[in-house]
Image (cartoon, rainbow, N blue to C red):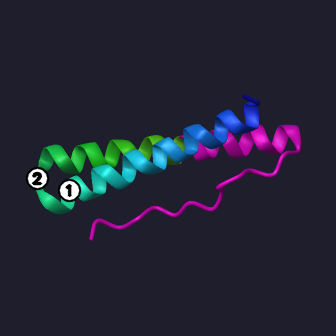
Amino acid sequence: MSSTATLAAISRELDEAAEQARLGYEFSPGSYTYSALRACLSARDAFAAYRAIVDDETGRRPQGAGHTERGLT
C-alpha cells in the first residue's frame, strides 16, 4: 500500500470513528460520550492538519480533504 493510500485509509477510519462517536452521543448524551466524540474530532482534525503539511511538502493533492467539524446535533 502506498503512503497516499495509507493516509487516505487512516483519514477514512478517523471519519468513521467520529461518526460512530457522534451517533453514540446522540443516542446517549452524557459526559462520557461527549468526551469520546471530542477526542475523535480532535484526532481527526489533528491528522487532517498533519496530512495537509505532508501533502504540501510532497506536492500531493490530498484525497478526502475538505473535512468540516460536525456539530453536536
Which residue is drawn at the image coordinates 78% and 43% (left, top)? 55
Stretch of the chain drawn in magenta: 47-73
Q: Amino acid at mark 1?
A: Tyr
- Which mark is drawn over residue 25? 1
At label 2, counting other C-alpha atoms closer than 10 Å, the crowd grade (few under 14, some 14-19, many 20 or more) is few
The answer to whether residue 8 is left or right of residue 62 is: left
Instruction: Look at the image and tell me whether residue 42 can be seen.
Output: yes
Tell me: 21 left or right of 3.
left
Is 11 on the left-hand or right-hand side of 62? Answer: left
List the single residue furthest toward the bottom: 73
Q: Is residue 71 above or below residue 12?
A: below
Question: Callout 1 environment at 10 Å: few (<14), some (14 to 19), or many (20+)?
Answer: many
Residue 23: image quadrant is bottom left
Residue 2, percent across and down?
A: 76, 30
Q: Amino acid at mark 2?
A: Gly
Residue 41 seen anywhere in this rendered image of the structure: no
Comparing marks 1 and 2, which lies closer to the viewer? Answer: 1
Tell me if residue 4 comes above or below residue 1 in the rendering: below
**Alpha carbons under labels 1 and 2: distance apart:** 7 Å
Image point 21% across, 53% down: which residue? 24
- Figure disc tally: 2
Spot occupied by residue 17 in the image (x, y as percentages of width and height): 38, 45
Q: Position of residue 56 (x, y in %)?
A: 81, 45
- The residue labelled by disc 2 is 30
CB under 8 Å between discs 1 and 2? yes
Q: Is residue 61 above or below residue 39?
A: below
